Image (tube, rainbow, N blue to C red):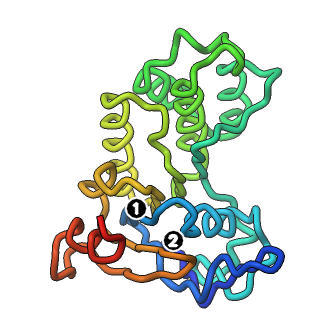
Amino acid sequence: MNNIEIKNLNLKLGNSDILNNISFDIIAGKITGFIGNNGAGKTSLIKCLTSFYRNYDGSIKINNQDLKTIHISYITDSPVYYEELTFGEHIEFISAINESKELIDYYIDLFEVRRYLNHFPSELSKGTLQKMMIILALLRNKKLLIADEPFTGLDPSQVDVFKSELISLRNKGCAILISSHQLSLIDEICDNFVFIKAGQVVYASDKSAKENNTYDLYRKYFGK
């Protein structure tokens, strides 16, 4: 089991306390929804999980191994790419070592991007760039997937396609964390929820154990 344990995590940037005593688990074979308003600390925590920030106190471990030493799959809402590589060359670069052509073709067709493979990032829409980031992440490590506002730029049909793929990965034992400020986008696919407000976890629970539905809990903590 590839569970991630976040324990007593604190992050300070300059003179500002960004994260305060954060503790929760990301469980293998589960989709954890990470909910909070803009500025609540979601992206900062994800930057700790992806080792962009390393100057935090506390621990992040997978199977008791420090997460700083482990590669994970990461999807951001702000696509990162090489301007000199085409869409297809990005896929070749990521998948050269260990992915089959069948799987590559599966994702290309699933997200309907074959006609863009010879295009450079500057020629692509934000939605198509987001699809590229999703495909690149899915072609990497299948054990741990962290997604920060991953539906940005996707049309409704592609949101549904991606949700179905996330469910498939979950059923294969992948540990998944999805960050969003829109509960409606992720409520139906998440097994667990963590709510963060002003850098602190205010609620964390297994979805099946909650006393109220997720929207009631959301209104309780965020007032809308």
Q: Which label was assigned to residue 186?
A: none
Q: Where is residue 210 in the image (x, y as percent from the top left)?
A: 21, 80
Neighbour class for label 2 at 10 Å: few (<14), some, many (≥20)? some
Q: Which amino acid, mark 2?
A: Asn
Q: Where is residue 86 in the image (x, y as percent from the top left)?
A: 72, 18
At mark 2, the secondary structure is loop
Compare marks 1 and 2 and give the one earlier in the sequence.
2
At mark 1, the secondary structure is loop
Q: In which quarter of the image is residue 90?
A: top right
Q: Where is residue 212 in the image (x, y as percent from the top left)?
A: 16, 77
Residue that carries the numbered disc 2 in the rendered image:
2
216 to 141, vertically: above or below: below
127 to 31, vertically: above or below: above
166 to 217, vertically: above or below: above
* Point 62% across, 18% down: residue: 124
217 to 186, vertically: above or below: below
Quadrant, the C terminus: bottom left
* Point 74% across, 71% down: residue: 68
Asked if the residues shown at circle 1 and circle 2 are in contact, with their CB atoms under 8 angstroms apart, the answer is yes
Q: Which label was assigned to residue 173?
A: 1
Give me the C-alpha separation between circle 1 and circle 2: 8 Å
As rendered, which of 54 and 216 lies closer to the eye?
216
* Point 16% across, 82% down: residue: 211
Q: Which amino acid, mark 1?
A: Gly
As rendered, which of 37 and 85 lies closer to the eye?
37
Image mark count: 2
Neighbour class for label 1 at 10 Å: few (<14), some, many (≥20)? some
* Point 59% across, 76% down: residue: 62
